[in-house]
Image: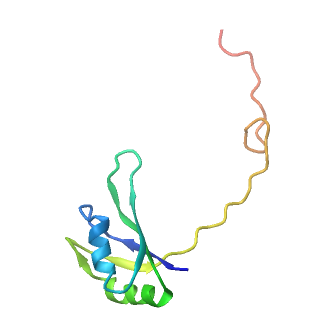
C-alpha cells in the first residue's frame, strides 16, 4: 500500500504533470489529486500525492518540502487519515434531535 502526502501552497497554474515531474525524483507516484473548487473548477492550491512505498514518501517529503514549483514554495507533509464518520440516528421528521415541530396557523 502506498503512502498519501498532503501538498499545500501549490501554484494555481500548476498541473498534475508538473507535480508528477517533481515527485518522480523521489520514486513512483501512484496518484495525484489536485483539489478544485466545485463551482468554479479552479485549483484550491493544495492536493494529495500518493507514493508507492513509505520509503519513497519519506524521500518525497525530504526533497519536495520547501521546493519551488512555478512561483510558490511547496509544503509537503504526511496526509492524515480521514476522520471516521459517526452514524447519525434516524429521525423520521428530518429534524435535529430535540427540535419540536413548529405550531401555528401560518400567515393570513
Tell me the residue at 62%/67% (across/down). Answer: 83
The image quadrant that residue 105 belongs to is top right
Task: List the single residue furthest toward the left.
Answer: 71
Q: Picture coordinates of residue 74 (x, y %)? A: 31, 76
Q: Nearer the viewer, residue 96 or 77?
A: 77
Task: List the single residue furthest toward the top.
Answer: 108
The image quadrant that residue 6 belongs to is bottom left
Q: Is 88 placed left or right of 15 in the picture?
A: right
Q: Nearer the viewer, residue 94 or 52?
A: 52
How did the renderer colour the structure?
rainbow
Q: Is 87 placed left or right of 76 in the picture?
A: right
Q: Is 27 placed left or right of 89 in the picture?
A: left
Q: Picture coordinates of residue 7 (x, y %)? A: 39, 73
Quarter of the image with the C terminus is top right
Quarter of the image with the N terminus is bottom right
Tell me the residue at 40%/81% (across/down). Answer: 28
Tell me the residue at 32%/53% (across/down). Answer: 42
Q: Nearer the viewer, residue 27 or 7?
A: 27
Task: Work out whether 3 lies above or below 14.
Answer: below
Q: Nearer the viewer, residue 58 or 74?
A: 58
Q: Picture coordinates of residue 2 (x, y %)? A: 51, 79
Q: Is 39 placed left or right of 15 in the picture?
A: right
Amino acid at each position: 500500500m502506498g503512502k498519501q502526502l498532503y501538498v499545500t501552497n501549490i501554484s494555481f497554474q500548476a498541473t498534475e504533470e508538473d507535480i508528477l515531474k517533481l515527485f518522480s525524483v523521489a520514486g513512483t507516484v501512484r496518484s495525484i489529486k489536485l483539489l478544485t473548487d466545485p463551482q468554479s473548477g479552479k485549483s484550491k492550491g493544495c492536493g494529495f500525492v500518493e507514493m508507492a512505498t513509505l520509503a519513497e514518501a519519506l524521500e518525497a517529503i525530504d526533497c519536495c518540502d520547501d521546493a519551488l514549483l512555478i512561483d510558490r514554495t511547496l509544503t509537503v507533509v504526511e496526509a492524515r487519515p480521514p476522520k471516521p464518520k459517526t452514524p447519525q440516528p434516524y429521525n423520521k421528521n428530518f429534524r435535529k434531535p430535540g427540535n419540536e415541530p413548529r405550531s401555528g396557523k401560518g400567515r393570513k
